[in-house]
Image: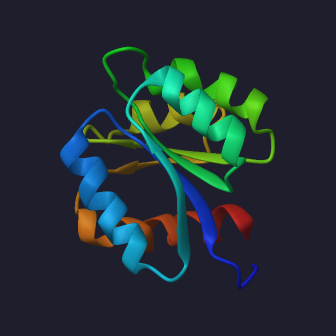
Amino acid sequence: MSDAPLRIVLVDDDRMWLSLTSALADKDEGVELVGRSSTGAETMQVVAQEQPDLVLLDLAMPDVDGLTMLPNLLKVAPGCRIVMVTGNDYAPLRQMAKEAGAIGLLPKEPLASLFDRLRDLLATVDA
């Protein structure tokens, strides 16, 4: 794994979660926040432009759900990895996310440990 920060785009329609997660990312030396968005169209644009290493993608948004959006994100940023985030973590959702092309699904809470849990997930995928 490189010493360079992980370039991340955050996607969620919950502005409070997006704001708090952005603040955590800004404090984490292993993360470079390169974009954030709260709608499907905005997400496509940001991801295509920034070509991030990873997108944290909300599973449920009002204009488009993350599972529907995921394959399109992989088309505009083929080298990007996508991790779904949700407030409803249970096995069927994890399987659906993986089948759609995500490397995993993480619960949104506890927020304070999100990036640690993300690194743990990446370590298991990269192993």
Residue sitting farthest toward the left? 16
The picture places residue 116, in percent across and down from the top left corner, at 42, 74
Residue situated in front as seen by the camera: 95 or 10:
10
Residue nearest the viewer, comparing 122 with 7:
7
Image quadrant in which the C terminus is located: bottom right
Residue 3, quarter of picture? bottom right
- Image point 70% across, 36% down: which residue? 48
Q: Residue at x 68, y 56 (%)?
A: 53
Q: Is residue 109 visible?
A: yes
The spot of residue 103 in percent (x, y) is: 62, 47
Apparent side of residue 1 relative to residue 25 in the rendered image (left or right): right
Q: Is residue 88 left or right of residue 84?
A: left
Residue 38 percent coordinates (x, y) = 37, 33
Task: In this rendered view, identify the residue nearer to me: 127 or 32.
Answer: 32
Above or below 93: residue 103: below
Asked if residue 108 can be seen in this view, the reply is no
Which colour style is shown? rainbow
Which residue: 67% across, 24% down? Answer: 71
Q: Quadrant of the N terminus?
A: bottom right
Considering only vertical position in the picture, is 62 above or below 12?
Answer: above
Residue that protrudes farthest toward the top in the picture: 63
Q: Give the number of marks.
A: 0
Residue 39 x %, y %: 41, 26
Q: Is residue 47 left or right of residue 77?
A: left
